[in-house]
Amino acid sequence: MTDTYRQPGVVLTDRRFTVPLDHDNPSGETIELYAREVVARDKADRDLPWLLYLQGGPGFGANRFVGKPAWLGRALEDYRVLLLDQRGTGASTPANRQTLPLRGGPAEQADHLTRFRSDSIVRDCEVIRPQVTGGARWTVLGQSFGGFCTVAYLSMAPEGLDTALITGGLPSLDAHADDVYRAAYPRIERKVAAHYARYPRDVERARRIADHLLTHDVVLPNGYRFTVEAFQSLGLMLGSGDGSHRLHYLLEDAFVPTPSGPRLSDAFQEQAQALLSFAGHPLYALLHEAIYAQDARPTAWSAERVRSEFPQFDAAKALAGEEPVLFTGETVHPWMFDCDPALRPLRETAELLAARTDWTPLYDPARLAANEVPAAAAVYHDDMYVDTAHSLATARAVHGLRTWVTDEFEHDGVRTGGPRVLDRLLALAGDEV
């Protein structure tokens, strides 16, 4: 059964599909995928080609757009669009602290979650494609982790693709998680320096908040233990186009006077918990390092281990001197599973995933070198989330892939500059190779 309804300028249809949990056992257990079909109202009766949108993450459901903002309006000029909730996210058989115990204990949960990486997502797409397009190829637009999935698609099932478009999501084909984070921390430090240059008073504001958290036990209204490391992780915002400004607004009025002295305000705490909680996207925390795992080496809490190589991120040391407190971002740490009530029940599951040594390859370099699918990628200069050098090395490894390297946008350029970004990629992909 499908539901069709209207919003300004668009017709939406809910689509649900059944796919194998384990594609190597197609007659075994199944899960449900949810996707939203979007078509411009004045084109609703036309036979249009399809564009599949793969959201960033891992762990986030597809955007819940109202009307046709950002890139969507441009896409709807030429396509019907399918906004897919990748397995385990959104309305697609969710995987979280409430549902995972149905699988059994932590070992069973960890085994279950190994089937939620890009390789399984690509195989899901190939199961549903004939049901959506009647067997025709479709164009895929992959943002961030969705781009990782798109490169896996080019490796595993290029016959399903008409065109591959990638924004901020060209992964390294062979880097271990340690290599990813060793490259990430200097980029994060540059983003923090740029933020403090823009908002110099935030240096002292961040130091004051960090000092308060080091000397007080703070529990946010939802039960989140708000530590100094958790505060530093709010730097995740600095990788988006308006993130520096949003961080500034968060910091500028953090304290209120109380009978017990200055305390972090309820308003500040409410905003912080919304930014820190993984309740809506626990797979981001559980699988974030696993998306880089492709061999017998465990990820072993890579971001936490590599951070020790960058002592400037130690807030206590910064406060002991006169250095600014550095924010972090795009990293997952074991303490998150102690602080966040949405993750606490999954701590042992996360430990088992971090120790796992039987990861399988996600990309096929030989097949990518022989690629014939028109492909284009936006690579954002000094992207905080995805290393530019890694992205460009992969671009060179994919035959025919055209790149647009720009510092006009941050990692979320497909949101902030959507129509122009999509136009540029479509033009690049349409050029003769």
Image (cartoon, rainbow, N blue to C red):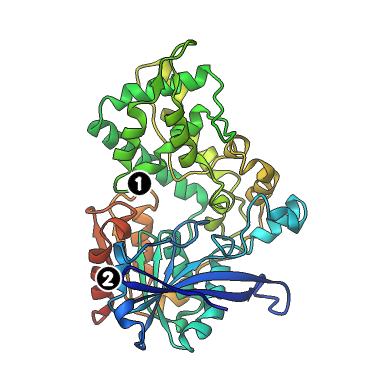
Disc assigned to residue 379: none
The percent position of residue 293, horizontal first and vertical second, equals 56, 57
Give the residue drawn at x 30%, y 51%.
Answer: 410
The percent position of residue 403, horizontal first and vertical second, equals 28, 66
**Secondary element at tag 2:** helix
Whether residue 277 is visible to the viewer of this picture, yes or no, is yes
Circle 2 packing at 10 Å, graded few (<14), some (14-19), many (20+), is some
The residue carrying mark 2 is 74
Q: Is residue 339 above or below residue 387?
A: above
First reached walking from the N terminus: tag 1 or tag 2: 2
**Front one among 9 and 217:** 9
Of the 4 image quadrants, the one containing the N terminus is bottom right
- Amino acid type of the residue that numbered disc 1 sits on in the rendered structure: Gly
Q: How far apart are marks 1 and 2 (CA)?
A: 24 Å
Q: In this view, does 161 lie above or below 398?
A: below
Q: Disc 1 vs disc 2: which is toward the camera?
A: 2
- Amino acid type of the residue that numbered disc 2 sits on in the rendered structure: Arg
* Left or right of 145 in this view: 338: right
